[in-house]
Amino acid sequence: MASSGHGKDFHVLSTKEYNTDYIGKYKTEKAYAYFKSNFVGTVSWAEVPNDTERCFLTSEVTPSQGVRADPHKLWVLLNNTGEVLTSVCSCTAGMCHTCNHVIAVLYKVEYAIRNNLHSKSCTETSCQWNKGTRKEVKPKKIQDMDLRSDKAARKSLSAEARQDNKNLKLAYDPRRQAERFKTSAQVSSFLSGLKQLAPHCALFTGLAAQVKTNESGQILSTLPQLAERCLNLNKNMDEHKLSQKFGESLLFTKEQCETLEKSCRQQSSSSLWQEHRKGRITGSNVRRVVRKVEEKIRNKNTGITSLAYHLVSGGQDLSHVPTIHDPVG
């Protein structure tokens, strides 16, 4: 385990199944507090049979919400350079190959290596860093408690290291390696099976896009255009069925999505972008919609005419506002 901490950084970023909120601030999360609070038990080391390039670390970590409960058991697989290959912990998050308990153990190992404690004899005082953590917790008065927030000191990184961290974050993929590439047949089989089990699943009723292989990749009609077309074709239909019919018309192909996205990248300076905003809840009006819904819940008589007009008309002129996420709108 490299004393620079790259082992922990690599472990969090490479597992691909961990919460993205943890990335970039792992040093200030619970793992370091576990280590500083002596929650990490004795760390044991074992070779992999017939393998000189990899080894196992095993340990136990006391649960933060139940210090008298049985500790979480875990193991970490590393190669001989200190690179973390995988890990498993008995806690709920541990099956995703990384958790606070695993990283707390890595903090303990890093601390021992940084202070050259791992080479000491087990009879020496300095070897006490690796003792167990099982102890009786006795009640105390609040005034006698040691209340603190442990955070590891951040080290200044070179420009190259900062760029490496940035690249890791940009390349982050939450899926496991085997789940990142699926054939069309696998996707179709999954959707078909899901539809049989849950035909009313929100995936089928609320998905904004569905691929139609028999359609061209032309630019989508705007919502007002689609609404007018639906009304003209179904003049004698009741409102409930008409709304369902309108929803069915809001299907578009992958090619249409890509063409529309490329055409609207300039956002406020794109007339096409202005037209396709009409009737849609966007980043600039979503807060207004949320407030109106909250008002409607409190008072059923709350009017929505002004909001409806605002949405259908596309809102205020935003031609003076620069692109938010240039070059992609």
Image: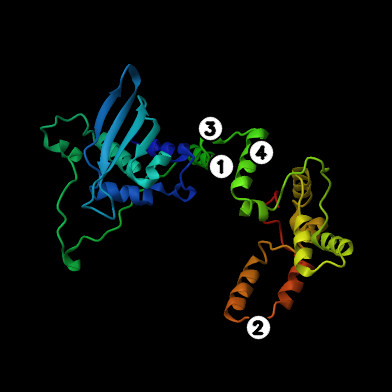
Location of residue 282 by image quarter: bottom right
- Pick whichever, 327 or 156, lies toward us: 327
- Taking the view exactly as shown, the residue that stands out farthest to the front is 196
**Label 1 close to label 2 by CB (< 8 Å):** no
- Pick whichever, 154 or 91, lies toward us: 91
Whether residue 155 is visible to the viewer of this picture, yes or no, is: no
The span from disc 1 to disc 2 (Cα, nearest Å) is 47 Å
The span from disc 4 to disc 1 (Cα, nearest Å) is 29 Å
The span from disc 3 to disc 4 (Cα, nearest Å) is 17 Å
Q: Amino acid at mark 3?
A: Ala
Identify the residue position indicated by label 4 in the image.
188
**Label 3 close to label 1 by CB (< 8 Å):** no
Which mark lies nearer to you, 3 or 4?
Answer: 4
Q: Mark 3 or 4 closer to N-term?
A: 3
Q: Amino acid at mark 1?
A: Leu
Label 3 CA crowd tier, 10 Å (few <14, some 14–19, many 20+):
few
Identify the residue position indicated by label 2 in the image.
301
Q: Mark 3 or 1 closer to N-term?
A: 1
Identify the residue position indicated by label 1 in the image.
170
Q: Mark 4 or 2 closer to N-term?
A: 4
- Pick whichever, 73 or 27, lies toward us: 73
Q: Mark 2 or 3 closer to N-term?
A: 3
Q: What x and y, as percent, mark residue 294?
A: 59, 74
The span from disc 3 to disc 1 (Cα, nearest Å) is 20 Å
The span from disc 2 to disc 3 (Cα, nearest Å) is 53 Å
Q: Which mark is residue 110?
A: none
Q: Which mark is residue 178?
A: 3
